[in-house]
DNA sequence: AATGAATGAGCTTTCATTCAT
DNA sequence: TATGAATGAAAGCTCATTCAT
């Protein structure tokens, strides 16, 4: 019987693990203090590691933040793709799944939303943040537009400018996120989802039943 | 015979004027560099004044930023109220005016939007920012809900959850702002307005003609 | 009887005075600890001022060090020019004065020598140090060569390569500085001067009496 | 049949070899970046080895640098002793050989000179550097003085203060090294040698022919 | 009311050193 | 013997704030 060696969680972790751990700590800190008041000390303390650790694994603070945003973007995309996968066939079902995925706990809890808005708040002055934020929506928008096209054809809906509607829907989605983050009266993910679904029912009355 | 004292226009400027000048400089700097990289030196330089000036007029940086956000909020509200005033009678016309006011140059140029999002980005960790951001929408939402109620009654639209629609519309409005700020492909105020109007036409087909 | 207002020596000093004060403190610290171990804290403490003071007046450490070296170079040149001025007419007297000036207390006390060698020690990797160090000798060498030429003509000395001799003399001068700095057995400025003068007497026997 | 174990030439290298390898790397780095900017990472990278290697073989940085200086000192001494050995009999020939050895490529290439001056630059504040630097010259000076004594007797030169001349010559030698290191106009080892030889020819005209 | 030199806390970053492997 | 992830003290620098003028 071999003795199980004690794990030494702080030392000798795989690089990927460390980086992920630090990104998580960064998210934690940004949500708690904001981007401007997040220091590397906060991050390393949150991660339970030492001062220089961020510079060791990310070279500098800027890079850590970029990687954090990229991580968020990746997680977001993986989430809606998974939701699409699992959704029943047919544009209505897929559409519902896609839009509902925005309000799943793992991507739009208050912590994550705080971080998204923190980055968007600096996007104008930081090209990298802007770029990654844009990338977040490119594929999503494309798929959304495609689903809308199919649905409109299927339902024979008329008088709809698809591009405008796509833009309207993504705008509403983002705005609902803001509402979750900021609203005075406890507006939450589930509320947001309801608003979105109600919009869909109204826009596509023949598919009403799918949008619940 | 008393000597006429030399006027010192820059030094004698009334308190209010100085404060406004500094708030404008703050907006300028936040839009250019972001909230996190805005320093009091940037602000005073932009205003063409000296180092200690912000502390003199606003006591400290935090206070300047709070007042800046309040200023923005006031300007925003004055703008939509003025738009309502000028609008033709009747809920449809008023509604159109209210929602279109969000895309007027003075409140939603990229500079102002950058500043709004900068504050929202820190809202979670700064109760004051959160509060002022909430206040921005209280009256607006109330009026919007009222107008929707009247319009629905007038048009006999059925199956509409007014609260949800109100939330959906304000969300879309905010999301369109984000799109203006961040979008890759030059999405601008006029595009945003089009999206909003197309939404209204679709939601209220009988009043179509008002929403252009 | 008016009360004499207390001087507040640390605040509100003229810029030039502060810069000089900091350069002096830098010299002090470099002599004491070496270039590598001189920190901005040492400098500001030595000057009796606060942390950020160097950055305020010199932007950054590198610039302070460059200016320190420039200051040394200026002081050195002013010293030998003054010595030349005061020297009796005739190449021999001028030559003696020029070369003796290198061993005057204000330019070649151990503190100053330590600083010169500290900079020379980094000259290879720091182009700025190298350049300023070169500039130190350009005019000096020129004048020296001229004086030698005149003296040789005057004394009818033959078989002398003036350029080589100029280089030899400046080299000896620098080497004597090193000896003052490093020698085990208390070799000092006066010893160095003796060595130089003895060299001159030997090289120019007809002018022997001038070289004491 | 025993399997021949794989040689691990890099890992099995004898202590002495490793130490030498690291000293060489230190010299490389000091010449390239200066003493102040030389880090243990630079040294280990230059040596193609890993982070902790210097601490393993030299305990700490200070020790590595001391050993580096000692190595240089040893190499220097071995060089002039070898030169003396090979020189023809008689004080003039020996003297020429001794002084010329200072300008041989292995001891006074720019890299080595940069390192010497780097250490001298810190000598005032680092007793160890000072001591090793002094030791470099003790035997050399002694031999030099002896050779000068013999030569003066042999040539019947009068009016020479031997101690002063010894000091003058070593000073000139060091100063010529500085000139090689710093001069603007490509002054090199061969130029330095010429200056020294010309000095000797002038000082000892009867032995002129030996000093070429 | 306004200036701007000065302060000093606090930040990011570097790097010698340690130590599990 | 050698590695390199991790540490943490200490550095340079920034900047909100103070205050003599």
Image (cartoon, coloured by chain):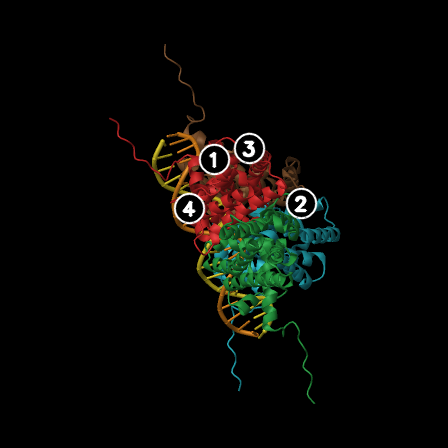
Chain colours: A red, B green, C cyan, D brown, E yellow, F orange
Residue positioned 53% across, 67% down in the render = B58
User: In the visual, does E18 lie left or right of B153?
Assistant: left
Say whether mark 3 and mark 2 are on the same chain: yes
Task: Work out whether mark 2 precedes mark 3 in sequence or the reverse, and give the earlier one.
Answer: 3
Residue position marked by numbered label 2 in the rendering:
D184
Q: Which chain is indicated by disc 3?
A: D
Say whether mark 1 and mark 3 are on the same chain: no
Q: Residue furthest left?
A: A1
Residue A8 figure quarter: top left
How far apart are the alpha carbons under marks 1 and 2? Answer: 71 Å
In the picture, the quarter occupied by the N terminus of chain A is top left
> x, y (%) of residue E15?
47, 44
Few, some or many residues within 10 Å of mark 2 (<14, 14–19, 20+): some
> x, y (%) of residue C13?
56, 68
Q: Which chain is indicated by disc 1?
A: A
Whether residue B69 is visible: yes
Q: Are marks 3 and 1 in contact (CB under 8 Å)?
A: no
Residue position marked by numbered label 1 in the rendering:
A83
Q: Are marks 1 and 2 in contact (CB under 8 Å)?
A: no
Closest to the observer: C209 or B163? Answer: B163
Closest to the observer: F20 or C119? Answer: F20
Closest to the observer: A83 or A201? Answer: A201
Say whether mark 4 and mark 1 are on the same chain: yes
How far apart are the alpha carbons under marks 2 and 3? Answer: 30 Å
Q: Which mark is residue A44?
A: 4
Q: Are marks 1 and 4 in contact (CB under 8 Å)?
A: no
């Amino acid at each position: 019987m071999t003795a199980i060696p004690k794990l030494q969680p702080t030392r000798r972790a795989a690089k990927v693990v460390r980086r992920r751990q630090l990104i998580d700590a960064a998210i934690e800190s940004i949500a708690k203090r904001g981007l401007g008041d997040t220091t590397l000390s906060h991050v390393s303390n949150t991660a339970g590691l030492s001062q220089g650790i961020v510079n060791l694994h990310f070279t500098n603070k800027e890079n850590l933040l970029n990687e954090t945003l990229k991580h968020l973007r990746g997680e977001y995309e993986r989430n809606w793709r998974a939701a699409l996968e699992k959704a029943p066939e047919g544009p209505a079902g897929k559409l519902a799944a896609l839009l509902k995925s925005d309000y799943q706990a793992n991507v739009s809890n208050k912590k994550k939303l705080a971080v998204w808005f923190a980055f968007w708040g600096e996007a104008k002055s930081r090209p990298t943040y802007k770029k990654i934020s844009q990338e977040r929506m490119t594929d999503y928008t494309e798929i959304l537009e495609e689903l809308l096209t199919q649905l409109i054809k299927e339902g024979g809906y008329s008088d709809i400018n698809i591009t405008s509607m796509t833009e309207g829907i993504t705008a509403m989605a983002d705005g609902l996120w803001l509402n979750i983050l900021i609203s005075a009266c406890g507006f939450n993910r589930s509320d947001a989802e309801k608003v979105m679904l109600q919009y869909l029912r109204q826009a596509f009355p023949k598919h009403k039943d799918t949008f619940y």
